[in-house]
Image (cartoon, grey):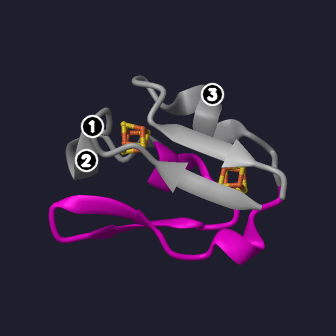
Amino acid sequence: MSVTIDYNKCNGPECAECVNACPMEVFEIQGDKVVVVREEDCTFCLVCEDVCPTGAVKVKED
Ligand code: SF4
Ligand code: SF4
């Protein structure tokens, strides 16, 4: 799976909807950014895309 965040759209840690919603803890807050840390654990549930208010998260099957 490939999980990417478009930083031109992401609202960062003040949002963190994807961090809180992902059941596999794929996202993490690091400083002033939300980053993808466990892409390999992604199950393609697409909850993160659903909760992201700006369309910044994209998940693709490899
Ligand atoms: S698709 Fe599901 S498991 Fe994968 S990063 Fe998004 S919320 Fe997490
Ligand atoms: S849900 Fe979207 S806007 Fe919010 S932190 Fe995650 S990627 Fe950024």
Q: Which of the image's four quarters has the C terminus? A: bottom right
Point 60% across, 41% down: residue: 58
**Kind of residue at badge 3:** Asp
Picture disc at residue 12: 2
Relative image position of residue 53 (x, y in whole percent): 42, 23
Query: What's the magenta region?
Result: 18-43
**Kind of residue at badge 1:** Asn
Relative image position of residue 30 (x, y in whole percent): 27, 72
Q: Is disc 1 placed on a helix, strand or loop? A: loop
Q: Nearer the viewer, mark 1 or mark 2?
A: 1
The answer to if 22 sits in the magenta stretch is yes
Which quadrant contains ligand 2? top left
Q: In this view, does 29 lie above or below 4?
A: below
Label 2 with label 3: CB-CB less than 8 Å: no
The answer to whether 6 appears left or right of 62 in the picture is left
Point 30% across, 45% down: residue: 7
Ligand 2 closer than 8 Å to the CB at disc 2? Answer: yes
- Residue under pointer 3: 50
Label 1 with label 3: CB-CB less than 8 Å: no
Q: Earlier in the sequence, mark 2 or mark 3?
A: 2
